[in-house]
Image (tube, rainbow, N blue to C red):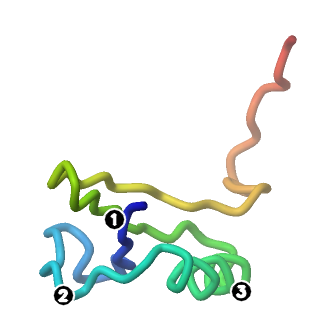
Amino acid sequence: MPKMAWLEKPHWMAPPPLSAFRPAGALLPAVIEKMHAWRSPQQVMLYYPEQQRYERLFLVPDDWPRQVPLPPVEG
């Protein structure tokens, strides 16, 4: 299970120290709450200790982006 760090502006470009990473399940509710309250993307970084690997993710609301209309999905 990966650990997660919330990358808030203006400190979101460089990876945080390992001490900033928490269990994803403990941190995710606060990130989702802020995402819905602000209606804006939130950036997080996952750390997989077994592989010593990082992943950067943007979590976005379902209706994002509101400003740019997207073409309909064909399928």
Instruction: Name the mark nearer the viewer: 3 or 1.
Output: 1
* Outermost residue to the top: 75
| Secondary structure type for disc 1 | strand
Return the residue at label 3: 37
Res 21 label: none
Earlier-in-chain disc, 3 versus 2: 2
Q: Residues within 10 Å of mark 1 (few under 14, many from 20)?
A: many
Q: Position of residue 71 (x, y in %)?
A: 78, 26
| Residue visible at 28% across and 57% down in the picture | 48
Counting from the top left corner in percent of width and height, residue 49 is at: 22, 61
Is label 2 in a helix, a strand or a loop? helix
Give the Cα separation between the discs numbered 2 and 1: 13 Å
Q: Are marks 3 and 1 in contact (CB under 8 Å)?
A: no
Q: Earlier in the sequence, mark 2 or mark 1?
A: 2
Identity, as a three-letter code, of the amino acid under mark 2? Ser
Please give left or right for residue 22 compared with residue 13 in the image.
Answer: right
Question: Measuring 68% from the left and 85% from the top, which residue is drawn there?
Answer: 33
Residue 63 or residue 1, whichever sits in front: 1
Q: For the residue marked with disc 1, what is the amino acid?
A: Met
For label 1, the residue is: 45
Residue 60 sits above or below residue 19 on the image: above
Q: Secondary structure at mark 3?
A: helix
- Circle 2 residues within 10 Å: few <14, some 14–19, many ≥20: few
Q: Which mark, by number, is residue 19?
A: 2
The residue type indicated by label 3 comes to Ala
| Residue beneath the point at 34% across and 77% down | 5
